[in-house]
Image (cartoon, helix red, strand yellow):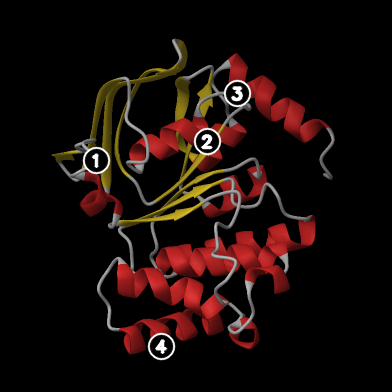
Amino acid sequence: MRIRLEHLEKGFDGVPVLRGIDFDDDVTTLAVIGPSGGGKSTLLRIVGGLIAPTDGTVEVDGERVDYDERALPSYRSQLGFVFQASGLFHHLSALENVALPLSVVHGVPEDQARERAADLLARFGLAAEEAKRPAQLSGGQQQRVAIARAVAASPKMLLLDEPTSALDPEYTNDVLDLIRDLKETGTRFIVVTHEMGFARRACDKVAFLHGGRLLEYGESARLFDHPATPELQRFLGKLLEWSIR
């Protein structure tokens, strides 16, 4: 999925959040990293068609994204979304949470949607939990259900916005392992994350945002081993200061 951003800008109430971002690449697995408030989630939501840029353009596979609300549902249906909170329907079971969008949004017959949902939950280690509602699941299990829902329709790209930020460490590892496994099966994704080990080992490319600007982009190993800007050097230095070596 080729993504091209040209002079992308976004502000809220006159406060700039993204500043003149240019980008052009065929994205397979991309981690977006950087300090809080740097515009990472805003960028992901613009690419996903959830909010419109203030200025600039977004092209996906050579077609400009039209941010008119009448045109966006078709574009969004090609993508899968996972956010910090699972966003599951509290009154539905795990299986129903995965199956419902398939039948309602994508027009899959209900029996086929439920079969697909059951297969995914089994694949994600949740076969025994398919009848449970979100309140009966751990945080990690809820996020795995959310990921199953996001990939159920085989999206062209999965967009994940800090999917582990609200999880305990043991559940964080479960979710990161699942995302890494999706990569092995050919799922493309963009993930906003503060998990630097995951960004380095599971993502082919890394984008570093700072102060609303895209300061560095390239192969994961290069950015982590040889950061070119003082901003990335300081950012990684602070994160690694208290890490287990």
Disc 4 residue type (three-letter): Glu
Q: Which residue carries the number 4 mark?
A: 115
- Local crowd size for mark 1, using a 10 Å CA cut-off: few (<14), some (14–19), many (≥20): few
Q: Earlier in the sequence, mark 4 or mark 2?
A: 4
Decide which of 58, 114 is in the foreground and name it: 114
Give yes or no for contact between labels 1 and 4 (Cβ–Cβ under 8 Å). Answer: no
Q: Which label sits on residue 222? A: 2
- Local crowd size for mark 3, using a 10 Å CA cut-off: few (<14), some (14–19), many (≥20): many
Residue 111 image point, x, y percent:
35, 89
Q: Secondary structure at mark 1?
A: loop
- Local crowd size for mark 4, using a 10 Å CA cut-off: few (<14), some (14–19), many (≥20): few
Say which residue appears at 41% left-offset and 66% top-offset.
Answer: 151
Q: Earlier in the sequence, mark 2 or mark 1?
A: 1
Decide which of 137, 178 is in the foreground and name it: 137
Q: Earlier in the sequence, mark 1 or mark 4?
A: 1
Q: Which residue carries the number 3 mark?
A: 232
Decide which of 82, 230 is in the foreground and name it: 82
Q: Secondary structure at mark 3?
A: helix
- Local crowd size for mark 2, using a 10 Å CA cut-off: few (<14), some (14–19), many (≥20): some
Q: Secondary structure at mark 2?
A: helix
Disc 3 residue type (three-letter): Leu
Q: Earlier in the sequence, mark 3 or mark 2?
A: 2
Residue 21 image point, x, y percent:
36, 22
